[in-house]
Image: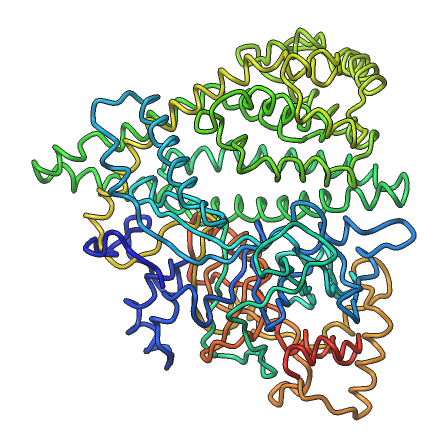
Amino acid sequence: MIRFCRLALSWLILSAAVPAAGDEGMWMPQQIPPLASRLAALGFEGDPRAFADLTGQPMGAIVSLGGCSASFISPEGLIATNHHCAISALQYSSTAERNLLRDGFLAHARADEIWNGPGSRAFVTTEVVEVTDDLGRRLTSDLTDRARHDTVERWTKERTGECEKDGSRCRVASFFGGLRWFEIKQLEVQDVRLVYAPASGIGNFGGETDNWQWPRHTGDFALFRAYVGRDGRPASHAKENVPYRPKRWLKVSPKGAEPNDLVFVVGYPGRTERLQTAAEVAETTEWELPRSIRRAEEMIAIVDDLAKTSPEVAIKVEGRRRGLHNGLTKNRGVLTGLARGGVLADKRTQERDLKRWIAADPERQKEFGGVLEEMEALQARGVATRERDATFRSLLSGQGSLLGAADTLYQMAANRPKADLDRESEYQERNWKRIREGLVRMQRNLDPKVDRMMLRYALAEAARLPRDQRIEPLDKAVGLSAGMADADRDKRVDAFLEPLYATTRLFDLDYRLSLLDKSLAELMATKDPFLDLVSALEPLEERLREEREERQGAGYQIAPRYMKALLQKSGGLVPPDANGTLRVTYGRVEGVTPRDALHYKPQTTLAGIVEKHTGKGEFAAPAALLDAVSALRAGRTSPFVSPALGDVPVDFLSTVDTTGGNSGSATLNARGELCGLLFDGTYDTVVSDILYEAGTRSIHVDSRYLLWVLAEVEGAKEILQEMGF
């Protein structure tokens, strides 16, 4: 059961200065019981308090995959998630001769299940404790911005270390800009294996053409299994490990979801930004999204060309290619929605109202006076050098994987001699195993040609920076300057890259791993050109880190005041912005009218797959699926046919409020059964990350399609029996 340190503090939490409306809300589990009357009005007959018990049903069955969501669906640790959440696992085990990305995979026996590779994890949240007061005692008013940041960071490390003494994985997360803080404890399963993923003609049917669109006919499902040591505790991948036996798992519904049904989605949404100020919305609209869209378009062109060079390279770049396409489509939709929805004008109106409300009372003036101006000033501090800072982050964060690996090795060597609490958070000892796993896993996707082209792109970006935002050590190393002609720039970049890739030894896995334990002096003595480049960039990296942390320290003081002002003005039971922590959202299965005279029904069926099937590219359904449809049409009976539709349902729409990270989330009916898997949103309403609209819809794959494919297409009787069929 969730424990609380501050039960006296009301859950009158705010969002965008107004209480949540309609089905808006990615609620913390402990916020669900107070919503009992809302849920009862929707026909919910269960006990809302069950959602606040993280070890009970259904919450004890909910899983995070570290970027995607999932759920246990058997007592033997079987996990259901999305097909697109299995791309990394499929890619890791694919070869040109055995392309699992294209052909899919099915293990008929436990011994056939494939390890997802180093770094794969499954997390189950077991406890959430509010720790706001504990931090508050440390944040005295006399602290400088930098001292405030350092205080929060050290406190976070201390709490995390204490929490993890029992072998759990822990995190201290802030909500509402640091107004409230919670310590989150999770079981960390370290051996996750692939059980089933359909062929791309099912799991990615429609491809990028249908991505973020409705109607949809995608079988976006896959199955993993969690393994642990023979003692039942999390353990590194090993042949002798045994399936994890969760205390809770979900029953998969053979009846799926029908129009007007109440549904819940439980998972780990990544990030929403509904509490942005007007200045932040303006920056998102005018700079951040246009930049992201441009970069994605340019990188997709590079990756698509590389994929044509060989089947091996195509497999290596597939994950990157899909991620770029997915982000590009979503960002285009968000930008269109921001322009259409008048978000900036609404934000400015809300801020004028807030200023008037503060000015109307002397006590409010004393506590909140000038807070909006301080928020704007803080945001402006990062605007001045945003082009340089963003370009530098992209350069070192793996635009070319090898430079990112070199930076990791350098930072490990620089941090290792320090006491653990003094190390940068990502290089504390608790993360050393993950760092090693990352350096191992990258080998499957590492290709000199791909790496060079992506680094070449990053260097060209740096060359285009304005004169007052140059990355000076990079200019010196490569011979770049502001205003350089494209032809001259390309010549210098290519001349720089040639010896870089000709002489490095970092492509060799064993050599790369051998450097993890080296001192900084030993590392630099290797004279590897990538390490030399990282060393040259390090002074700027350190300066940018200092500037960023000072701004964060200022934010820890300003943002909570801003949030508290909104809270006092608006009131209402409202959820916090998504931040990668466990959330519950609810709504109905319902169609939508996106524009005049156009109405979308809430369900699609097998008939739509047959209609869309062309036999080529994104719309090539497997022959086994088409044969199963023909058999159904010829009179074969199936318990997964919807009586109302006269066909097997494939996907459905609902009004639930979701975002990235929710992919693979369990969609539950009013009885707590798994009736589907959340996998997407609609293009018209992806702006909901910033502005929730009444027409917002989420897309789910119906549990009946999953069961029908397993039964009629795959013949996976072992899996069906394990699930209780």
**Quarter assignment of residue 715:** bottom right
Position of the N terminus by quadrant = bottom left
**Quarter assignment of residue 462:** top right
Left or right of 100, for residue 39:
left
Residue 515 % position (x, y): 70, 24
Q: Residue at x 74, y 28 (%)?
A: 512
Residue 239 % position (x, y): 74, 56
Q: Is residue 288 above or below residue 564?
A: above
Considering every residue shown, the one lying at the far front of the view is 231
Position of the C terminus by quadrant = bottom right
Q: Residue at x 54, y 30 (%)?
A: 427
Q: Residue at x 68, y 76 (%)?
A: 705
On the question of residue 595 being in view, the answer is no
Q: Nearer the viewer, residue 157 or 47?
A: 157
Left or right of 427, for residue 92:
right
Q: Is residue 36 above or below residue 435?
A: below
Residue 128 % position (x, y): 37, 54
